Image (cartoon, grey):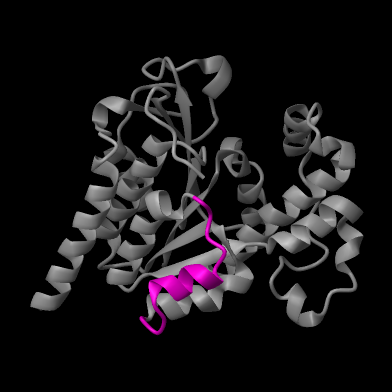
Amino acid sequence: MRKPILALAATLFLATLAFSQTGITDANYRVFDADGTPSSLEKIIEAAGAVDVVFLGEQHDDAVGHYLENEIFRRVFERYGKERKVALSLEMFERDEQIVVNEYLQGLITEKKFLDDSRPWGNYKTDYRPLVEFAKTNKLDVIAANAPRRYVNMVSRNGRNSLGPLSKEAKAWLAPLPYAEASEAYSKKFKALMGGSGEASMGIDNILSSQSLWDATMADSMAKYLKQNKNSLIVQLNGAFHSENRLGTVEHLLRYRPKAKVIVVTMRYEDDFQNFDKSKFEKAGDFVILTDAKVPRSKR
């Protein structure tokens, strides 16, 4: 019994050290419910017990958001890990990397080889490593949820039909084809965001289709896991746009598993993070966490 306890203590120490170096405390964020009523992390943990997936929608360079993801994942496991199988699902790893992730979690390969072969994001060591190491120590699954970037790029350049000639093996790394079109609400929101961007010159409809492939594949990854692991609880990390307002990945998940229960936590950094602006954040998530924009950003 002593070894598991020591291992857990070591993981918690490393995670705490990684985030304590930034000086982040409870004073650097505020938690609200969907309507802007002040809430708490404890309310999020309580709500997690009644669902299948907890979506944590981040800004990728938000150091406070990463601190909170680690805190929520740890607390979810501590609260529910004895009665349910808790898993971590990540936008930041792609489905063709799952075997590498599994080999690392099982201790078959070194961390160096894991990082050499899994195409980690530039901020992996500071922002996502603590969660993966916590999962590794506690023998939790980590789902490499995303579509391989090369296929997302194919769609953004040449449209969704360009996926047709792919091999059966390649298609296994994607959501079942043909994947669903974006909803009207998601499409309107996406085009409002991207309409003036340089990427839109490639064709906004193709870019939207590539975004939907991203969303659908993450959703399919989680749907498959829930089917194979009854009564499991997934903590999913993704960019906030993929899940806020319960759109995007959430919509696709509910197509694949209509009875799935989810909560969405949307995290945004704001200069005035102590006050909830309803015009910007109402219904952005079942919970909305505003973080201190003055905290230095993570570096990708």
Which residue appears at 75% of the width and 76% of the height? 170
Q: Is residue 203 visible?
A: no
Query: Percent x, y for residue 59?
Result: 51, 37
In what quadrant of the picture does the N terminus appear? bottom left
- Work out whether residue 171 or residue 225 is closer to the camera in this orientation and state it: 171
257 shown above or below 291: below
Which residue appears at 62% of the width and 56% of the height? 253
- Work out whether residue 139 or residue 154 is closer to the camera in this orientation and state it: 154
Query: Percent x, y for residue 188?
Result: 78, 31
Q: Is residue 42 left or right of residue 179?
A: left
Quadrant housing residue 29: top left
110 shown above or below 291: below
Q: How many marks?
A: 0
Which residue appears at 38% of the width and 50% of the height? 126
Q: Is residue 188 left or right of residue 227?
A: right
Q: Which residues are magenta?
A: 107-122
- Work out whether residue 109 or residue 93 is closer to the camera in this orientation and state it: 109
Q: Is residue 199 left or right of residue 33?
A: right
Is 117 one of the magenta-colored residues? yes
Query: Percent x, y for residue 119?
Result: 57, 64
Q: Is residue 185 visible?
A: yes
Query: Percent x, y for residue 246?
Result: 59, 41
Quadrant housing residue 5: bottom left
Quadrant housing residue 37: top left
Which residue appears at 23% of the width and 62% of the height? 11
Residue extending farthest bottom: 108
204 shown above or below 272: below
Is 245 one of the magenta-colored residues? no
